[in-house]
Image (spheres, helix red, strand yellow):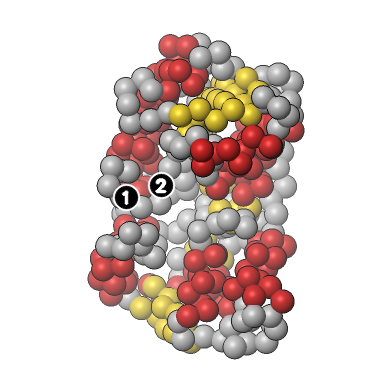
Amino acid sequence: MTQQRVTVFGGSGFIGRYVVERLADQGAVVTVAVRDVEAAKFLRPLGQVGQVTPVKVNVRETNAGARAVDGADAVINLVGILYKTGRQRFDTLHAQVPAAIGRVCADKGVARVVHVSAIGAQTTAWSEYLRSKAAGEEGLRENYPGATILRPSVVFGPEDGFFNLLGALARVMPVMPVYGGGVTRFQPVYVGDVAAAIVSALGDPSTAGKTYELGGPAVYTYAELMKLVLEYTGRKRLLVPVPFFVGEIQAAFLGMMPKPLLTRDQMLSLRGDNVVNDGALTLADLGVQPTALEAIVPTYLRRHRKGGRLGRTSAA
């Protein structure tokens, strides 16, 4: 991949920083298309001088990505949000933006496009988040049929918003709600493995037009993940089953917060399993060995122990 020119949309986010670092390590010249260039300056030291360049792009503007794509050999789209706020809407960022990127890449003759979606992306999904992800896949493929699509399960890593949120809640809540009885299944995947899969797909033309589902080596129920969080944070909390409909009422109020702890749409997502489907192409097909959750998550959930990282591990 030496001196390949790659444009990464949404490259300053959780997954993006790992992708940019891998690309830089392999010698690529990386343009990172972001809303806030100042906030993305931390990416520059991931490469040599001039190798990683954040550029300001408003993806909501028509053909806004054209400037960032000029001269690119490959494009990666990581643009996404977990909840809606103001002008940040699912239909815009998850559906319209991928279609627009596909159109621009086709017009510019970009050789490779890799798009990150989500496991469970279906037009008939319970949640708007997943329906918008499905619409984005369709729009992208209509305009750029050779795009490679990657669908990760819940992604974990030091900066994640899933395990860190549960860990933070365990610090302050004497009782932890387990929605829907905690039977929803997840297959958490390490952010470093997702980044490796993206770069692998980018460098392998045989992945063009294919869809891969990315999951870790083990499947857990929501209740099992909650118990692991309590174990890793050294907390003893009562886990109380809460019906989905009650959770949706709670989420309707929590979703009004500026940075909501939980939204109704996220509650709807919990009604369906989040695991790799039988027969799907996976990390293994991209040459990536999945990393066990148990090897990574305890290392950063220590911050949520009583007394912080150096706190005792006995239940509190």
Q: Residue at left 69%, top 61%?
A: 296
Left of 181 or right of it: where is 246? left
Task: State which quadrant residue 306 falls in.
Answer: bottom right
- Residue in front for this viewpoint, 130 or 1: 1
Most distant residue in the front direction: 38
Up/down of 252 relative to 57, above or below: below
If the image is split into quadrants, where does the C terminus sit? bottom right
Task: State which quadrant residue 136 falls in.
Answer: top left
- Spatial CA span between label 2 and label 1: 7 Å
Question: How many numbered marks appear?
Answer: 2
Q: Residue at left 74%, top 33%?
A: 25
Residue on which disc 2 sits: 81
Residue on which disc 1 sits: 84
Left of 135 or right of it: where is 144? right
- Residue in front for this viewpoint, 6 or 177: 6
Residue 65 position, x and y percent, is 42, 23
Q: Are marks 2 and 1 in contact (CB under 8 Å)?
A: yes
Task: State whether residue 143 appears in this view.
Answer: no
Q: Residue at left 64%, top 80%?
A: 307
Task: State which quadrant residue 16 falls in.
Answer: top right
Residue 28 position, x and y percent, is 68, 24
Task: Say which element carries label 1.
Answer: loop
Residue 107 position, x and y percent, is 43, 11
Up/down of 169 relative to 124, above or below: below
Q: Amino acid at mark 1?
A: Lys
- Residue in front for this viewpoint, 28 or 276: 28
Left of 22 or right of it: where is 75? left
Residue 254 position, x and y percent, is 31, 67
Q: Residue at left 46%, top 29%?
A: 56
Q: Amino acid at mark 2?
A: Ile
Task: State whether residue 69 appears in this view.
Answer: yes
Pointer 2 local density, CA inside 10 Å: few below 14, some 14–19, many at least 20: some
